[in-house]
Amino acid sequence: MHKPVMTIKEIAKILPHAYPFLLVDRILEMDLEKGIIVGQKNVTMNENFFPGHFPDAPLMPGVLILEAMAQTGGILIHKKGYDDKIAVLMTVNNAKFRRPVLPGDVLMMHIEGKHFTGRGGRVQAKALVNEKLVAEAEIGFGMTTKEQL
């Protein structure tokens, strides 16, 4: 296992989310020059959504997979120099869900930055489990401050 580039404590200082909405456990890779980041979410049966989302056949909701990818992208945007702003989800394009994400899976979010400005940004996101694609989307962000929320 890799030593994380960022731990959950460091992630929690960047993202304005808290349990149960913080969906990134660690950052394993980050290359700011190339604009890429790899985040990890350990999916356990203890997740608060499993009792109500197909209780007899639990699977992670697709919107939460998208949110985990968006949060990982938000960390990339922050680290690219926009640390005085918060990236807020604005658009999701070409989202596709390929396989279910189940309790016990390790969800890996691979994010590539496509465009960043002080007003917004766009990333290409892929989520994988066991190196198999489970979801993908182009995610757009608007930039704001905590005071504007």
Image (cartoon, rainbow, N blue to C red):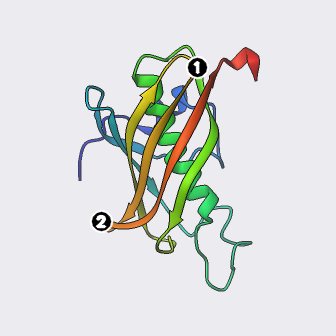
Q: Is residue 127 above or below residue 140?
A: below
Most distant residue in the bottom direction: 56
**Residue 135, image x, y percentages:** 47, 62
Q: Residues within 10 Å of mark 1 (few under 14, many from 20)?
A: few
Which of the labelled discs sits on residue 58, or is there none? none
Using the numbered discs, state the Cα–Cα distance from disc 2 to disc 1 in whole angstroms: 33 Å
At 51% across and 74% down in the image, what residue appears? Answer: 100
**Given the image, on which type of amino acid does mark 1 rest?**
Arg
**Residue 61, image x, y percentages:** 62, 65
Most distant residue in the front direction: 94
Image check: 63 left or right of 37?
right
Q: Are marks 2 and 1 in contact (CB under 8 Å)?
A: no
**Residue 85, image x, y percentages:** 58, 18
User: Which element type, helix, strand or loop, lies under badge 2?
Assistant: loop
Q: Residues within 10 Å of mark 2 (few under 14, many from 20)?
A: few
Q: Nearer the viewer, mark 2 or mark 1?
A: 1
Image check: 45 left or right of 99?
right
At 52% across and 64% down in the image, what residue appears? Answer: 96
User: Which element type, helix, strand or loop, lies under badge 1?
Assistant: loop
Q: Is residue 34 above or below residue 4?
A: above
**Given the image, on which type of amino acid does mark 2 rest?**
Glu
At 55% across and 13% down in the image, what residue appears? Answer: 84
Reading the image, the residue beneath label 2 is: 131
Q: Would you identify the image quadrant in which residue 106 lies? A: bottom left
Q: Is residue 74 above or below residue 92?
A: above
Which part of the image, by quadrant, shows the C terminus? top right
At 54% across and 58% down in the image, what residue appears? Answer: 95
Q: Is residue 63 above or below residue 60?
A: above
- Earlier residue among tags 2 and 1: 1
**Residue 94, image x, y percentages:** 53, 56
Which of the labelled discs sits on residue 119, or is there none? 1
Image check: 21 left or right of 70?
right
